[in-house]
Image (cartoon, grey):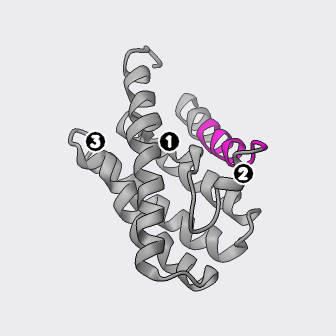
């Protein structure tokens, strides 16, 4: 039950972080700094974060400006990144997984929907992801490792 609650909490926190006033403006689109993406490294510590992130991204993107395509493809990309993060949890590649996956996958449909050149969109998405993952995400993992949660 504890793992289910943790996964559901991760989903809820992800959604809330996408829609905090002032932050929501930079959570969607070709240029993004999505604070909620700091949670994508949680599979390093908690396998139950994988479905939690999938659900959180699906719901956040479904009600976002790009709708169903963002919800389906974005949550699938997050699922892949989360599984890879878990798989590589003992290596630095755990942190690079969401940066690489989102840089490639998310930028494909944002390129199509927003009309930006693909390479510029990929560089923008990957840069925003890397900034969040390697600052807030790494800090979050470090602090949670120091905390007894089970």
Location of residue 12 (image quadrant): top right
Residue 47 percent location from the top left of the image: 41, 41
> Which residue in the protein does label 3 denote?
89
Q: Position of residue 34 (x, y in %)?
A: 58, 50
- Depth check, mark 2 against mark 1: the one in front is 2
Q: From the viewer's perspective, is residue 15 above or below residue 72?
A: above
Q: Quadrant of the N terminus?
A: top right
Image quadrant in which the C terminus is located: top left
Q: Residue at label 2? A: 24
Are the residues at dot 3 and dot 1 in contact (C-beta closer than 8 Å)?
A: no
- Identify the residue shown where x is 55% and y is 63%: 75
Secondary structure of residue under mark 2: helix
Which of discs 3 and 1 lies nearer the camera? The answer is 1
Q: Secondary structure at mark 3?
A: loop
- Determine the residue located farthest toward the left in the rendered image: 91
Q: Which callout, 2 or 1, points at the residue further toward the start of the chain?
A: 2
Indicate which label's residue lies in the foreground, 2 or 3.
Answer: 2
Q: Position of residue 102 (x, y in %)?
A: 44, 64
Check disc 2: other Cα within 10 Å, few if <14, some if 14-19, many if 20+: some
Q: Quadrant of residue 139?
A: top left
Rendered image: mark on residue 38: 1
Q: Which residues are magenta?
A: 9-21
Tell me if residue 54 comes above or below residue 113 in the rendering: above
Mark 2 vs mark 3, CA separation in Å? 29 Å
């Amino acid at each position: 039950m504890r793992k289910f609650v943790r996964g559901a909490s991760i989903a809820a926190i992800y959604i809330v972080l996408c829609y905090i006033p002032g932050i929501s403006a930079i959570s969607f689109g070709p240029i993004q700094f999505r604070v909620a993406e700091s949670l994508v490294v949680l599979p390093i510590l908690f396998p139950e974060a994988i479905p939690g992130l999938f659900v959180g991204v699906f719901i956040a993107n479904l009600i976002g400006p790009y709708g169903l395509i963002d919800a389906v493809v974005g949550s699938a990309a997050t699922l892949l990144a989360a599984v890879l993060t878990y798989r590589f949890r003992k290596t630095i590649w755990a942190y690079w997984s969401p940066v690489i996956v989102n840089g490639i996958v998310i930028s494909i449909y944002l390129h199509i929907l927003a009309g930006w050149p693909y390479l510029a969109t990929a560089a923008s998405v990957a840069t925003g992801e890397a900034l969040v993952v390697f600052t807030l995400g790494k800090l979050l993992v470090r602090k949670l490792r120091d905390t007894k949660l089970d």
